[in-house]
Amino acid sequence: MVPADSPLAAPADAAPRPVRTREYLMCPPEHFAVEYAINPWMHPEQPVDAELAVKQWDGLRETLTRLGHPVHVLDPQSSLPDMVYAANGAFVVDGTVYGARFRYQQRRAEAGYHRAWYLANGWTDFHIPEHTNEGEGDFAYLPAVPGVGGVVLAGYGFRTAIAAHAEAQEALARPVVSLHLTDPRFYHLDTALASIDDSTIAYYPGAFSAASQRVLRQLFPDALLADEADALAFGLNLVSDNRHVVLNSTATGMVAKLAARGYEPVPVELTELHRGGGSVKCCIAELRR
Ligand code: ARG
């Protein structure tokens, strides 16, 4: 906990942080299963409770809707058990869509379904990537970093090719900062770092190379620092509307740290989707008009 007299603690009489209405895309876990292992969290020999997964996913969708954020739904495909992790299908900034190209063959066909959805829904500025990248799994966006403006943070090391960072910069016309992920448990950027408002991030330093940690300290001296336990509980795999931060309910340490900073944590239960190596953020793609 941040002590009450710390400059990081939210004053008791602080005005509530303004909500920024988001627009999201999600894909129901109708065909969710752990049939192969492409990250250290996946254990195909351990059964998944498919019914509970659907119930928990519905809870997440209802939570977002209740907070006032429209949620679009992508049709799930029976041959694509990881499609529930909709964050991986593309990365959208100010109406421009940079498409995904999945690293593993098991997920490759997902990219086409995402692309078809964007094109059918009026997102005509769609860039088909040449380089391997897993969408918002490895790309985060901060719209208003002081003195800079919109900044893209991009991870590499396990899934997204570093060449995709340059490709995304050309497609989206925003500076892209490359960050090296070095711990296989945090194989996507969104397992180790999250934007919690227009210019603030939360991250777990231990997931990054020493040089990338230094880059993050330089760019974000006021970041909320998570520890290993927070990251292992998927406490960084969150979505924020500038006030409410929706995150995995077992990430109790992060809940406390966010509250101490004046955010309103909204915990949701997602134990079954954890078995595939994902949580809240992995299930949600943000559509930035
Ligand atoms: N089983 C999926 C994979 O390994 C999980 C993806 C999680 N998504 C995310 N945005 N981190 O590809």
Image: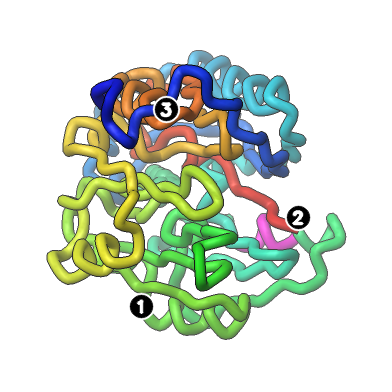
Q: Nearer the viewer, residue 41 or 186?
A: 186
For the residues carrying marks 1 and 2, which lies nearer the camera in this image?
1
- Count of marks, rendered view: 3
User: Residue 272: in sight, yes or no?
Assistant: no
- Say whether mark 3 is within 8 Å of ligand 1: no
Residue 159 visible here: yes
Circle 2: is it few (<14), some (14-19), or many (20+) Cα within 10 Å?
Answer: some
The residue range painted magenta reads: 111-116
**What residue sits right under mark 2 in the picture?**
117
- Residue that extends furthest to the left in the rendered view of this protein: 210
| Secondary structure under the numbered disc 1 in the rendered image | helix
Name the N-terminal-most of marks 3 and 1: 3
Between the C-alphas of marks 1 and 2, the distance is 26 Å
Residue 222 vs residue 55: left or right?
left
Work out which quarter of the rendered image holds the C terminus and state it: bottom right
Image location (x, y in percent) of residue 256: 33, 22
Which circle's residue, 2 or 3, is located before the other in the chain?
3
**What kind of residue is marked 1?**
Ile
Q: Quadrant of residue 252?
A: top left
Mark 3, secondary structure of its residue = loop
Q: Nearer the viewer, residue 19 or 5?
A: 5
Please tell me whether residue 117 belongs to the stretch shown in magenta.
no
- Which mark, by number, is residue 162? 1
